[in-house]
Image: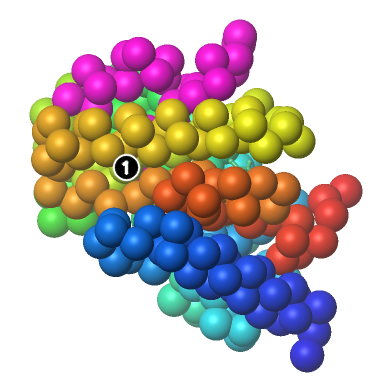
Amino acid sequence: MTDIQTNLEKVKQQVAELAKQHQSDNASAPDRSPIKVLAVSKTHSPEKVREAHAAGQSDFGENYMQEALDKIQALQDLPLCWHFIGHLQSNKARLAAENFDWVQSVDSMKLARKLSSASSADKPLNITVQVNISREEGKFGIDPDDTESFCQEILTLPNLKLRGLMAIPEATDDPAKQQEYFGALRQLFQTIGDKFNPPEWDTLSMGMSGDLAAAIAAGSNMVRIGTAIFGPRQ
Ligand SMILES: *Cc1c(COP(=O)(O)O)cnc(C)c1O
């Protein structure tokens, strides 16, 4: 087995164990959908993505438009599902809508409107709203206090499929802080789901290589993993 295959196996096993733990800690909770692993391939070559695909991985995340477009082009022969997860300028909305299946980093109405106009009703774009859950100064993402009304407005746009929320909390090794941020996003996810009942509200995207345990314990159902699958980035 190659390193990438071995790493993927390990990550999937870890995710499965954490999911089981979460399930038994919340015995009264209904069974949740399986936790999806998004392989974050930014800075890594198309060959590595090919290896991960050969090991059964289908969903990949990219942060930089030009790099991503080159990679998507080079891998056109594979049935991959591409997620844009970096900051997206609204002048690149059309490129994103035309080349990606998901945009996870929706953080303004201007961007959302452009993504909607660049998509169509028969091929709506999957999106999650990025929330600045740890309220960091100058960081991308909707303020937690504005997220409800933001989602409500998103739901009026015709060609977007609002799937849920995404966050990149402040980096910290403090488990209490991690729990606080992930718990807050989980709560928002629940509140918005209950209040507006969006038709396909199923994605709570939180957790990366360094904090996936805390994220899954708080109810994440999509973890975005780069380093633990592909190794360190240059
Ligand atoms: C790079 C990146 C990741 C993956 O980070 P790792 O620590 O390498 O797992 C996840 N989410 C976003 C938004 C990223 O930019």
Residue 3 percent coordinates (x, y): 81, 78
Residue occupying image coordinates x 44% and y 76%: 79
| Closer to us: 65 or 157 | 157
- Report the quarter where the N terminus lies: bottom right
Q: Is residue 196 left or right of residue 45?
A: left
The residue carrying mark 1 is: 164
Q: What element does badge 1 sit on?
A: strand
* Residue 141 among magenta residues: yes
- Callout 1 amino acid: Gly
Q: Residue 143 sits in which quadrant?
A: top left
Residue occupying image coordinates x 74% and y 52%: 43
Whether 137 is drawn above or below 9: the answer is: above
Coloring applied to the structure:
rainbow
Residue 2 percent coordinates (x, y): 80, 84
Q: Is residue 91 left or right of residue 197?
A: right
Q: Residues within 10 Å of mark 1 (few under 14, many from 20)?
A: many
Residue 150 percent coordinates (x, y): 26, 21
Magenta region: which residues? 126-152
Q: Is residue 192 left or right of residue 63?
A: left
Task: Tell which residue pokes out farthest to the right in this image.
Answer: 234
* Residue 215 among magenta residues: no
Regarding residue 197, the answer to whether it shows in the image is yes
Q: Residue 225 sits in which quadrant?
A: bottom right
Whether 175 is drawn above or below 122: the answer is: above
Residue 185 percent coordinates (x, y): 42, 33
Residue occupying image coordinates x 18% and y 47%: 120
